[in-house]
Image: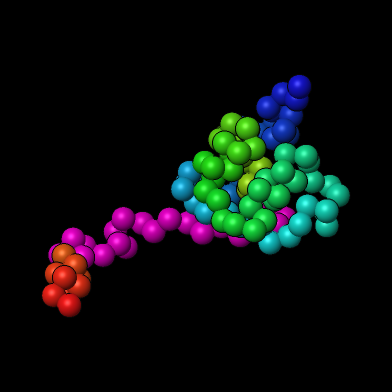
Amino acid sequence: MVRLYALTKGRARPAGEYLDIITLVLAITRPEHDLTLSPEEASILNLCRDVMLSVAELAARANVPLSVVRVLLADLIDAGHIRVVHPTAPDKLPNDRILREVLDGLRAL
C-alpha cells in the first residue's frame, strides 16, 4: 500500500490552475511514451485516452482521492500529457430570458 503523500511527492494541493470537479480531461499522449510516469498517472492517462472525463469521474474510476487526482492532473498538465476544458462560468451563461425566448421559438415551429 502506497501512502497518499507519496503519490503526490508530499504536496497537499496542486501547483498552478484550480481544477473544478466538473473540469473535463482528455489525454493527448499515451502513457507508454513517458516511462517516468507513476502507475497512477499512467492509469489516469489510460482512463481519459479516448473520452473526456471529469476530474471527479477520474478520481472515482482510478480509486484515488479527489485531492490526489488534482495534484497528479496538475503534473500531467505541466508535462503536456493532458488537455482540460474548464466549465463555463455562471456569468458567461445565457440568461433565463434568452433561453425562454429560444424555447418559445422552438415550440412555435
The residue depicted at 64 percent of the width and 58 percent of the height is: 50
- What span is in magenta? 75-99
Query: Quadrant location of the C terminus?
Result: bottom left
User: Can residue 18 be seen in the rendering of this structure?
Assistant: no
Query: Residue 78 appears at what percent x and percent y?
Result: 68, 54
76 relative position to 106: left or right = right
Q: Nearer the viewer, residue 28 or 15?
A: 28
Q: Nearer the viewer, residue 86 or 42?
A: 42
Q: Is residue 92 above or below residue 34?
A: below
Q: Is residue 5 above or below residue 80?
A: above
User: Can residue 85 be seen in the rendering of this structure?
Assistant: yes
Query: Residue 33 appears at what percent x and percent y?
Result: 83, 57
15 relative position to 6: left or right = left
Q: Is residue 108 above or below residue 71?
A: below
Q: Nearer the viewer, residue 7 or 109?
A: 109
Q: Nearer the viewer, residue 95 or 104?
A: 104
Is 96 inside the magenta-drawn segment? Answer: yes
Is 108 inside the magenta-drawn segment? Answer: no
Query: Residue 55 appears at what percent x and percent y?
Result: 54, 45
Query: Residue 57 appears at what percent x and percent y?
Result: 54, 42
Query: Quadrant location of the N terminus?
Result: top right
Q: Residue at the right extreme? A: 35
